[in-house]
Image (cartoon, rainbow, N blue to C red):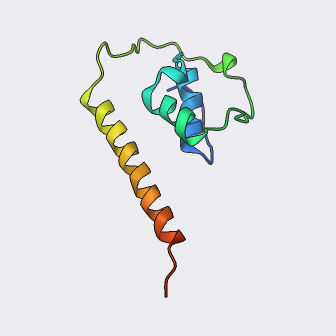
Amino acid sequence: KIGLVLVGTDPVAVDYVVAQLFGFQPRRVPYLKYFLKHRKLPLEIEIVGKTIDDCLIETSFKRAPHPSLLLGLSHFIYRAGDKVAKIQKKLRNMSVF
């Protein structure tokens, strides 16, 4: 138990903060890096209460030495989501008679 409650309207922004709490660099977490690059994750995340430095969590977690299948799958899901979004945009722009 870490004794923290984390709440946010943007789940990716919450994960960004959690990565920092556990001592990870968010830009080195593949899906956070993706969102920073493609989804314009807000760089100004409002934190209410204690600072991240006050809440750092000591852990023995380490980065996996090799990318896992799950990381590849998550990349595929995000890429598929981009394609769906493009198709939806095209459909919205089409004239309906």
Q: Is residue 77 left or right of residue 31?
A: left
Query: Image height check: is 22 above or below 69?
Result: above
Q: Position of residue 12 (x, y in %)?
A: 54, 39
Q: What residue lies at 74% left-to-right and 35% top-to-bottom?
A: 48
Front-lying residue, 39 or 53: 39
Task: Name the residue furthest left.
Answer: 69
Front-lying residue, 67 or 6: 67
Query: Image height check: is 8 above or below 15?
Result: below
Front-lying residue, 64 or 34: 34
Front-lying residue, 11 or 91: 91
Q: Position of residue 77 (x, y in %)?
A: 35, 45
Q: What residue lies at 52% left-to-right and 70% top-to-bottom?
A: 92
Q: What residue lies at 30% left-to-right and 22% top-to-bottom?
A: 67
Q: Position of residue 89 (x, y in %)?
A: 50, 63
Looking at the rendered structure, the number of numbered marks drawn on it comes to 0
Query: Image height check: is 85 above or below 24?
Result: below
Task: Name the residue furthest bottom.
Answer: 97
Q: What residue lies at 51% left-to-right and 18% top-to-bottom?
A: 24
